[in-house]
Amino acid sequence: MKLAMGLEASKVITFTLNITPAALTAAIKAQEQTFTVPAGAFQSGESLQLTDAVYVTPPTQNNSLAPFGYAFVSTVGPSGTAVITFGFYNLTAAASTPPAGNYLVTIVRP
């Protein structure tokens, strides 16, 4: 399947991941957290692959364009056959907690 700018993908998979991220420490830096992919996210016999490109759309709070306050998702990627690692970046020296809720996950398989 052709994607934007001539990129090709053999499969695109989307699912909702309901997570409650832990509070980020009071430091200006990226902090990783891992979450398990729900059992029904893939067809039978399939799983997350380390070569998959992972994209995430975070939940919004009160229709705000800045749902994270001082934290945002800076990286996301597979770290196992059923685990996705999120890198949340804290923009302030104060503790911050990314919002809990439904994150839309899109997997693009080359």
Image (cartoon, rainbow, N blue to C red):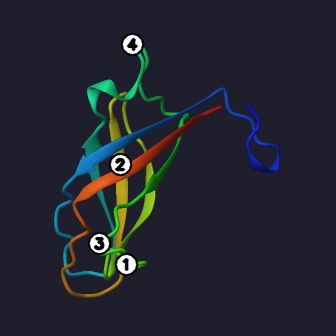
Direction from residue 48 to residue 69 in the image, left or right = left
Quadrant of res 31: bottom left
| Residue 107 location (% of width, % of height) | 51, 38
The residue that label 1 is drawn on is 64
The residue singled out by tag 3 in the image is 61
Image quadrant holding the N terminus, namely top right
Give the CA distance from mark 2 to mark 4: 23 Å
* Mark 4 to mark 3 CA distance (whole Å): 34 Å
Left or right of 9 in this view: 59: left
Residue that badge 2 annotates: 85
Name which residue lies at 43% across and 46% down: 105
Q: Residue 18: image x %, image y %? A: 25, 48
Q: CB of mark 3 within 8 Å of CB of mark 1? A: yes
- Mark 4 or mark 3, earlier in chain: 4
Mark 1 residue type: Ser
Q: Quadrant of the C terminus?
A: top right
